[in-house]
Image: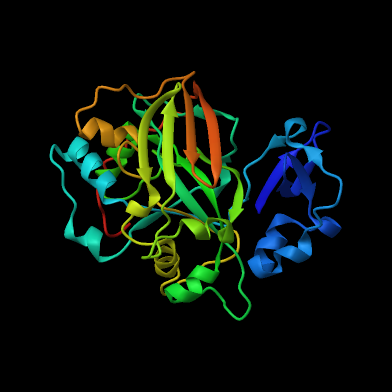
């Protein structure tokens, strides 16, 4: 089942399911947030596929979820190998990467939809990142706190395509301060085109519990990256379990897989010696993940921000 959010020609926002080539609202005006909170097991009670729908062609798809939070992992070793070569001059996967699945939190308020033009900061090193993300749902009897992988798997409501837009020059500066990423990332993230419920991808699970779905990214129609999501270091239930370790995941949380390998971002390709240029205004980025769907965005204008003064050199007095 595909769950979506949309805006119709009158500007009204709808939330419901995609049935064939139509969108059909949830019954009794239920919201997506309510459906996620009720959990995947309760989804049939929110759907009446016989109701009249609206053609997809007559609506504009919105981001399929308004995230409670966004965690983004770095779960593909091949990505780490390539990006580290570009940043440090040699490929380096630290031992700590193998010990636990690392993630960062990013901005849930700048999520964009497929079809949107993505305005960008003043960067000369704009990049994309091709990822698959899970959307968390509620589970009866579970608080989502400190859960093991088996329970974590039941909290995976569905999947959506993610593009973690990245300003590599801004990111490189702030990472030297040993904190971040922040401004190199928080200006935009695309999610979409909808949420595909977890059961729809069960046929793609391999014998080790990894999702063997193909992921591709195209820039201006040219294929620049392709990988299987099953090449990640941990299956999704283990990512969810780690996110909830001594913490909590709640319905509406989004967890990204991290960038796939083999050209899942330009940063990896640059580290491997590719001369492909950074993205520029007007470039089109299209991402396709098997069994989930595709998202397409065009890079917009560079938007200058207010000036930031340098740090003041202070006298470090200890008393007034």
Q: Residue furthest bottom?
A: 141
The C terminus, quarter of image? bottom left
Query: What x and y, as percent, mark residue 196?
Result: 59, 52
Does residue 2 appear to the left or right of 284 in the view shown?
A: right
Position of residue 191 relative to residue 153, above or below, is above
Does residue 33 appear to the left or right of 180 in the view shown?
A: right
Position of residue 204 relative to residue 282, above or below, is below
On the question of residue 80 being in view, the answer is yes
On the question of residue 305 being in view, the answer is no
Does residue 123 appear to the left or right of 253 in the view shown?
A: left
Name the colour scheme. Answer: rainbow
The N terminus, quarter of image? bottom right
Query: In the picture, residue 232 is in which quadrant?
Result: bottom left
Query: What x and y, as percent, mark residue 215?
Result: 42, 42
Residue at (41% x, 34% y) in the render: 128
Q: Nearer the viewer, residue 39 or 145?
A: 39
Query: What x and y, as percent, mark residue 3?
Result: 67, 51
Residue at (63% x, 47% y) in the render: 64
Q: Nearer the viewer, residue 188 or 268?
A: 268
Residue at (16% x, 40% y) in the render: 88
Residue at (43% x, 73% y) in the render: 149
Query: What x and y, as percent, mark residue 297?
Result: 53, 29
Q: Residue furthest left?
A: 90
* Total tally of numbered discs in the picture: 0
């Amino acid at each position: 089942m595909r769950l979506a959010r949309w805006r119709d020609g009158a500007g009204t926002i709808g939330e419901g399911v995609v049935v064939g080539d139509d969108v059909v609202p949830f019954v009794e005006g239920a919201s997506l947030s309510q459906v996620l909170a009720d959990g995947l097991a309760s989804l049939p009670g929110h759907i009446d596929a016989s109701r009249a729908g609206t053609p997809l062609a007559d609506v504009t798809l919105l981001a399929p979820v308004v995230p409670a939070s966004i965690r983004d992992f770095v779960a593909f070793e091949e990505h780490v190998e390539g990006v580290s070569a570009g940043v440090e001059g040699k490929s380096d996967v630290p031992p700590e990467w193998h010990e636990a699945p690392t993630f960062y939190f990013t901005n849930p308020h700048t999520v964009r939809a497929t079809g949107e033009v993505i305005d960008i900061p003043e960067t000369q090193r704009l990049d994309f990142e091709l990822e698959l993300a899970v959307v968390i749902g509620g589970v009866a009897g579970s608080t989502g706190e400190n859960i093991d992988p088996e329970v974590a798997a039941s909290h995976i409501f569905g999947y959506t395509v993610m593009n973690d837009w990245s300003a590599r020059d801004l990111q490189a500066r702030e990472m030297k301060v040993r904190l971040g990423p922040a401004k190199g990332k928080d200006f935009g993230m695309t999610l979409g085109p909808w949420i595909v419920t977890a059961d729809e991808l069960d046929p793609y699970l391999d014998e080790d519990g990894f999702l063997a779905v193909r992921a591709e990214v195209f820039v201006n129609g040219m294929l620049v990256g392709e990988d299987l999501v099953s090449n990640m270091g941990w299956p999704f239930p283990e990512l969810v379990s780690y996110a909830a370790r001594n913490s909590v995941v709640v319905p509406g949380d989004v967890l990204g897989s991290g960038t796939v390998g083999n050209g899942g971002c330009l940063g990896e390709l640059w580290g491997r010696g590719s001369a492909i240029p950074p993205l520029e205004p007007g470039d089109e980025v299209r991402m396709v993940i098997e069994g989930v769907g595709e998202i397409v965005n065009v890079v917009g204008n560079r938007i200058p921000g207010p000036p930031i003064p340098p740090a003041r050199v202070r006298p470090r007095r200890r008393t007034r």
